[in-house]
Amino acid sequence: MNRTALVLGALLVVPLLLFLAVSLGKDPRAIDSPLVGKEAPTFTLEDLEGRVYQLAASRGRPVVINFWATWCQPCVVEHPVLLSGARRYAGRVDFVGVVYQDEPAAIRQFVATRGAWGPSLIDPGSRVAIAYGVYGAPETFIVNAEGTIVEKVTGLVTPQALERILGELL
């Protein structure tokens, strides 16, 4: 009886331990996006001042679409990287921020104190975030001049990654 319980227990516990060992250290958000290689979902959103932005208007130039929020600490750390990138690639690459589950007043305050690297677009009901399969902020999608998503960065985008990706597109 005890031997049977021990064998059954081992049959249940060993696979679970193997699964945990294999999964340990993997970021559950780091899932390859099925959108890479496909046309970027189009959208029309308003910025903080009510100006309309259409992704289609950027056709012909690469676009960096960053989903971010003021409550997101990695987004705060990433902000200077995007500021620098937007300055470096001004006129050649469009940088667009889609506000992810945050309040316009908080975004206005953040931009007023830290600067803006592109329009901060309000995403009512997270429609655009859902279309892009955003799991959480920050997530960045790089769209080529033809409108195809060429890369997705989950978490912080580094200066090196931005330079590498945009360098390949320009």
Image (cartoon, helix red, strand yellow):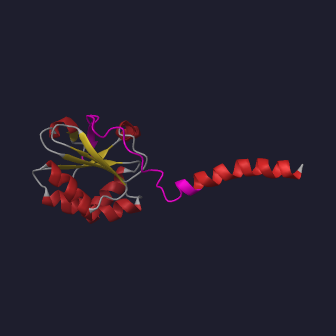
Most frequent secondary structure within the magenta stretch: loop
State how many labels appear: 0
Q: Residue at x 74, y 52 (%)?
A: 10
Q: Is residue 115 visible?
A: no
Residue 22 on the magenta span: yes
Residue 43 on the magenta span: yes
Q: Position of residue 56 (x, y in %)?
A: 19, 35
Q: Residue at x 26, y 58 (%)?
A: 161
Q: Position of residue 151 (x, y in %)?
A: 28, 47
Q: Residue at x 41, y 38 (%)?
A: 125
Q: Nearer the viewer, residue 158 or 12?
A: 12
Q: Is residue 118 visible?
A: yes
Question: From which residue to which does the magenta span run?
Answer: 21-49
Q: Position of residue 105 (x, y in %)?
A: 35, 54
Q: Is residue 87 left or right of residue 72?
A: left
User: Furthest-right residue in view?
Assistant: 1
Q: Which quarter of the figure has residue 162?
A: bottom left
Q: Position of residue 94 (x, y in %)?
A: 17, 48
User: Furthest-left residue in view?
Assistant: 91
Q: Which quarter of the figure has residue 145?
A: top left
Q: Nearer the viewer, residue 138 or 16?
A: 16
Q: Is residue 20 left or right of residue 38?
A: right
Q: Residue at x 48, y 56 (%)?
A: 26
Image: 162 above or below 125:
below
